[in-house]
Amino acid sequence: MGTSAEELTILVLYQCATLRVVSSGSDGEGTRKKLSPALLFLRDAGIALVFVASILLAMYAYTGLWPPLVVVESESMMHSEDNVSYVGVIDTGDLVLVKSIDSASDIETYMEGYTSGHRTYGDYGDVIVYLVNGNELATPIIHRAMVYLEANDDGNSFSCEALRDADGEKWDTTDPDDTWDHLTSTLRIYDVGFQSETVAIDTSRLVVADGYITKGDHNDNTDQSLSSRNTPVKVSWIVGKARGEIPWFGLLKLWATDSLKSDAPPNSVRNLWISLAFIIIGPIMLDVVITYKIRKRIARKREAAIREYQAEQAGMKPLPPEDRPPPPEPPAS
């Protein structure tokens, strides 16, 4: 097919406009060298590594611990009976940020939180991460600190200062002669947790030593009701207190290491796959949007250059016939 004189004129104008766009953007897209796919991959991987490293360093600066995150392996802190996870509560497969502590004053127990209103992860008080009997080879436990008991000088009783300021209907003891500063029987704390249960702490079975009584929000009994853990949690055993969470993503490690101790909540698994899909597809969609906008901007520049060139040509005096170049030969059809 042949090419008309009008089509040739438009083609020439377009090429001139394109040359103007490229030359006018000599410091922009026009002269920018294209990177090879391998270099693009290395660049993107480097940016991702720097981003992840920055986040980890920020976490370390905040927590004072390395690694700053722990993975929850079981359902002991969940707030449901039907294996459903919730954001803001510690569920199986969550990653939890752990902040270091210096002394007992850095931790607020359930009973202290009940009086002050301090809540974390859906209930009063702080959640702590501790080593069972201080054993660094054992898997740490992440449970809520219920009360802090201080051993009395008589060697047979405890004091719990948090009980002194708490509502009298919130707790009592099986021995009516017991007081907050002389506990020898079973301490009962009422209306605890999402199940509104009664937590019983038999102080007569405890090793008389300063420390915390801990309990998983999903569990019926305290950790210290077990014969292997009947010593209150000493401050020196505590790794840190929980602060913040990254839901679902710990499941990847638990599956890889086959260390999942209870069934993963189905909605956590679903949310994990959705999040991973978004992480993979999101950058691709962002790149498509950016490329589309860049091409539209270049197209607008070309159209503006064509209009400018046409206006310049319209304002020029036509050459006399003897000075005009011969018309281009049409290409062969």
Image (spheres, grey):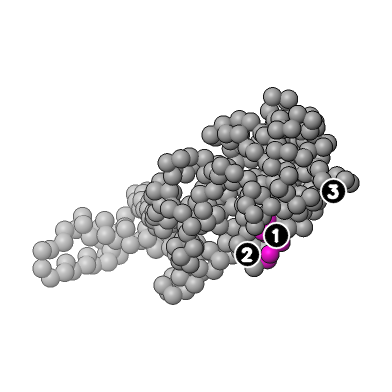
Q: Which residue is mark 3?
A: 155
| Residue in view at x 68 percent, y 66 percent | 136
Q: Which amino acid, mark 2?
A: Ala
Residue at the disc numbered 1: 133
Q: Amino acid at mark 3?
A: Gly
Q: Nearer the viewer, mark 1 or mark 2?
A: 1
> Residue drawn 12% across and 63% down?
2
Q: Position of residue 284 (x, y in %)?
A: 40, 57
Mark 1 surroundings within 10 Å by alpha-carbon count, few (fewer than 14), some (14 through 19), many (20 or more): some
Q: Is residue 261 left or right of residue 187?
A: left
Q: Secondary structure at mark 2?
A: loop
Up-down: is 202 above or below 263? above
- Badge 1 marks a residue whose secondary structure is helix
Quadrant placement of the N terminus: bottom left
**CA separation, marks 1 and 2?**
9 Å
Please name which of the two marks, 3 or 2, marks the residue nearer to the observer.
3
Residue 132 among magenta residues: yes
Q: Residues within 10 Å of mark 2 (few under 14, many from 20)?
A: few
Q: Nearer the viewer, residue 209 or 49?
A: 209
Q: Which residue is mark 2?
A: 138
Q: Magenta residues?
A: 130-136
Relative placement, left or right, of 194 versus 241 is left
Q: Secondary structure at mark 3?
A: loop
Residue 144, given in percent of the width and then of the height, sits at 64, 45
**Quarter in which the C terminus is drawn:** bottom left
